[in-house]
Image (cartoon, coloured by chain):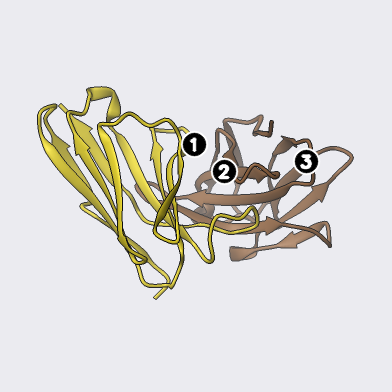
Amino acid sequence: DTEVTQTPKHLVMGMTNKKSLKCEQHMGHRAMYWYKQKAKKPPELMFVYSYEKLSINESVPSRFSPECPNSSLLNLHLHALQPEDSALYLCASSHIGWGGDEKLFFGSGTQLSVL
Amino acid sequence: AQSVAQPEDQVNVAEGNPLTVKCTYSVSGNPYLFWYVQYPNRGLQFLLKYITGDNLVKGSYGFEAEFNKSQTSFHLKKPSALVSDSALYFCAVEAGSYQLTFGKGTKLSVIP
């Protein structure tokens, strides 16, 4: 299994809603990432978990809350989002942790629309 | 600081012709360089990477890239383009900061 699975594929939420994005991989990877991607733009790093511990937080607003329950799962909890948060949210994983030569395996993303 | 530039927003090429997608980088140390491809409504897929060694790197789907230190370039190439190669291509660099920096992307359109 060489896939990173993200659910849901699409999500529409209001600014007062609470929702969660989920990501799962069974490749034994020990680093997992959340990226945000606006249309026709490069992905922007949000969070990095290495060995289930948050190692990088790119000054992301607190309305985004990551969680790594175990080495295979990564969640992104959303609360009180703004319309400008509408984007494709990508999960990724890599083999042994955050290292410069690691290739990333990406999921297909969750397309989020905030109304 | 590290950065990567993809000077072309879009590249058009006829099917069967060779293709080149350009990338230049700026780093203060030795770079790790990557190419990723993104098909519509999908995540990014790894194509190839340069870490060290041979300047010509071969990757997935017949793509290759040449690392040129003097020109600080890492152009993606393929000898014969397919319509199915049409996608968004991202060059990325990491050079000691443990953060992967992506270029803005180049849309490749292969015309039948």
List the residue tagged with mark 1. Answer: A42
Against A23, residue A80 (above or below) is above
Callout 3: SS: strand
The hue used for chain B is: brown
Quadrant of the image occupied by residue A59: top left
Shade representing chain A: yellow
Above-or-below relation of B70 to B81? above
- Residue A25, x across and y down, in percent: 36, 66
**The residue positioned farthest toward the bottom in the image shown:** A1
Q: Give the residue pinned by disc 3.
A: B73
- Near mark 3 (Cα within 10 A), the count class, few <14, some 14-19 or many ≥20, is many
The structure residue drawn at horizontal position 79% and vertical position 46%, both measured from the top left corner, is B30
> Which residue is situated farthest in the right direction here?
B70
- Residue B81 lies left or right of residue B72; in this view the side is left
Circle 2: residue type:
Phe
The location of residue A90, given as percent across then percent down, is 37, 47
Nearer to the camera, A18 or A110: A18
Does any portion of residue A79 appear in the rendered image? Answer: yes
In the picture, measured across the screen, residue A57 lies left or right of residue B94, that is: left
Residue at the spot x=70%, y=52% of the render?
Answer: B77
The one nearer the camera, A43 or A21, is A21
Going by the numbered disc 3, the residue's amino acid type is Ser
Amino acid type of the residue tagged 1 in the rendering = Pro
Q: CA distance from mark 3 to mark 2?
A: 14 Å
Above or below for A112 versus A59: below
Of helix, strand and loop, which one carries label 2? Answer: strand
Q: Residues within 10 Å of mark 1 (few under 14, many from 20)?
A: many
